[in-house]
Image (cartoon, rainbow, N blue to C red):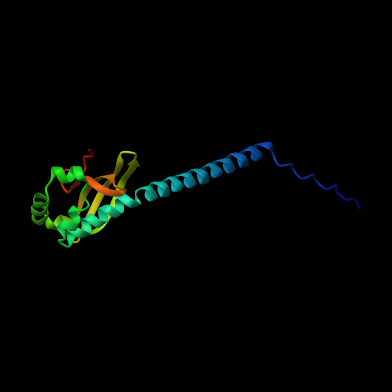
């Protein structure tokens, strides 16, 4: 009776080894890139939280017809450019633009000169309109220095 010698198992090729490392490296880079993007998103979101709160406060006050409270969110330069009487008359005439159900800001920035938020407002009627808000820090609080809602709001200053 003859027995056959066991066949040696083939050694894994070196080609397969480098493919594994390339795939692993790409996966690590993808995870790190996603983590960096998420971190950047949350840092910008946190930095614009104060300006966004002021915008919501302004929109809420104007939406319920409390034009004095909305006007209080204006910075001194904006108050010089637009009197309370002019703001109130304009806001009453365009009151539906302040009936906001939701806000989405696709552009956010904060620097030493202030903050900018741009995106869309979803009105209670269901219409989406473009919106742009520019804010400055005044006496420790965020205040509007410029804003546009509706037509023309797509253009930044």
In this rendered view, identify the residue nearer to me: 17 or 8.
17
The answer to whether any part of residue 39 appears in the image is yes
Residue shown at 37% from the left, 47% from the top: 47
Is 84 on the left or on the right of 141, as rendered?
left
| Location of the C terminus (image quadrant) | top left
Counting every numbered tag in the picture gives 0
Q: Which residue lies furthest to the right in this view?
A: 1
Q: Observer-nearest residue: 138 or 90?
A: 138
Q: Where is residue 96 in the image (x, y as percent from the top left)?
A: 14, 58
In the orientation shown, which residue stands out farthest toward the front? 139
Q: Is residue 130 left or right of residue 37?
A: left
Front-lying residue, 82 or 133: 82
Q: Which residue is drawn at 29% across and 47% down?
A: 139
Percent of width and height locating residue 16: 65, 40
In the foreground, 56 or 69: 69
Q: Position of residue 55 (x, y in %)?
A: 26, 52
**Residue at the (16%, 55%) spot, across then down:** 97
Give the residue displayed 33% in from the left and 42% down from the top: 109
Q: Is residue 100 visible to us here?
A: no
């Amino acid at each position: 009776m003859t027995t056959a010698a066991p066949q040696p198992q083939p050694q894994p090729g070196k080609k397969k080894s480098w493919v594994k490392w390339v795939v692993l490296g790409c996966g690590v880079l993808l995870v790190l890139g996603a983590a960096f993007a998420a971190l950047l998103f949350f840092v910008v979101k946190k930095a614009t939280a104060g300006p966004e709160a002021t915008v919501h406060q302004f929109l809420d006050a104007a939406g319920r017809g409390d034009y004095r409270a909305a006007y209080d969110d204006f910075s001194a330069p904006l108050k010089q450019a637009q009197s309370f009487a002019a703001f109130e008359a304009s806001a009453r005439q365009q009151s539906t633009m302040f009936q906001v159900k939701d806000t989405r800001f696709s552009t956010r920035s904060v620097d030493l000169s202030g903050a900018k938020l741009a995106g869309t407002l979803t009105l209670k009627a269901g219409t989406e309109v473009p919106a742009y808000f520019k804010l400055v820090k005044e006496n420790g609080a965020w205040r509007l220095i410029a804003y546009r809602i509706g037509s023309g709001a797509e253009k930044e200053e």
